[in-house]
Amino acid sequence: MRIRLSVVLGTVMPLMAVGATREQSDFVQIMSAQANVEHGAQLFQRCVECHGADGGGVTTGSVPRIAGQHKSVLVRQVLQFRGGKHWDMRMEGVANNAGLLSSPQDIADVAAYVNGLARDGKRGIGRGEFLEQGQSIYQSNCASCHGKEGEGDALREVPRLAGQHAAYLARQIYDAVDARRPALAASHRKRLAPLTFEEVQGVTDYLSRLGWNPERMAEPPAH
């Protein structure tokens, strides 16, 4: 058994390294491309069915808000869908080499367009029961990377979390804990695994309300 495992690992590890090298090469090429925002807008019309014309996704969390997300994060996500590091059948079909975003230029164009979309649409928020607890946990455990206001960091490819749908954020937390997001570092799982259900609800609710006016544009979950 040990011999077989060694053979398997000896075969898989070089393939993983090649895949990582290819992804990074594609990332550099896309980020270096001169984006055509008008072309990106045209391509995005085929994304509207899921993400909405404003890039707001679905407040129930089945589709994330991508409007205003950092370009570097959007590009990396597309490449991770393509490489099997982020799982979603819809996005894998869009991102593969024969899909809508088949060329580096297409990815650059759409990412630039989405990055420029306004971030003032409706958000799916939580019930508000655990906000104070969620704020404390976020500031203690997450703000050092994701920013005090959940703004992320474009240079470090850290996603903007502020204003994201609470239910979507909760799903990503559980996916990370259950290793369904292979690209997320083990440090995420280590930080997130101890959280109780109430703490997850508090953190995600807190983040969903950052950076906009929740009283005017919020959609709390149905009772």
Image: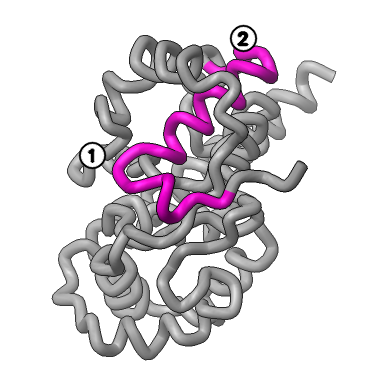
Residue farthest toward the front in the current orientation of the protein: 215
Position of residue 215 relative to residue 67, above or below, is above
Judge the density around disc 1: few (<14), some (14-19), many (≥20) Cα neighbours within 10 Å.
some
Task: Please name whichever residue, 131 or 180, is drawn nearer the observer in this view of the structure.
Answer: 131
Name the image quarter holding the C terminus: top right
Which residue type does callout 2 highlight? Pro
* Residue interval drawn in magenta: 192-219
Position of residue 46 relative to residue 142, above or below, is below
Judge the density around disc 2: few (<14), some (14-19), many (≥20) Cα neighbours within 10 Å.
few
Task: Please name whichever residue, 91 or 99, is drawn nearer the observer in this view of the structure.
Answer: 91
Give the colouring mode of the picture. one colour
Q: Name the chief secondary structure element in magenta.
A: helix
32 magenta-colored: no
Percent x, y of residue 54: 41, 72
160 displayed left or right of 194: left
213 magenta-colored: yes
Residue at 22% x, 46% y is 154
Q: Secondary structure at mark 2?
A: loop
Percent x, y of residue 150: 32, 34
Residue at 65% x, 55% y is 62
190 displayed left or right of 26: right
Mark seen at residue 153: 1
Which residue type does callout 1 highlight? Asp
Position of residue 78 relative to residue 191, above or below, is below
Percent x, y of residue 175: 65, 35
Residue at 42% x, 59% y is 66
What is the CA distance from the residue labelled 1 to the residue labelled 2?
Answer: 25 Å
Task: Please name whichever residue, 199 or 146, is drawn nearer the observer in this view of the structure.
Answer: 199
17 displayed left or right of 154: right
Labels 1 and 2: the sequence-earlier one? 1
Mark seen at residue 194: 2
- Camera sees residue 79: no
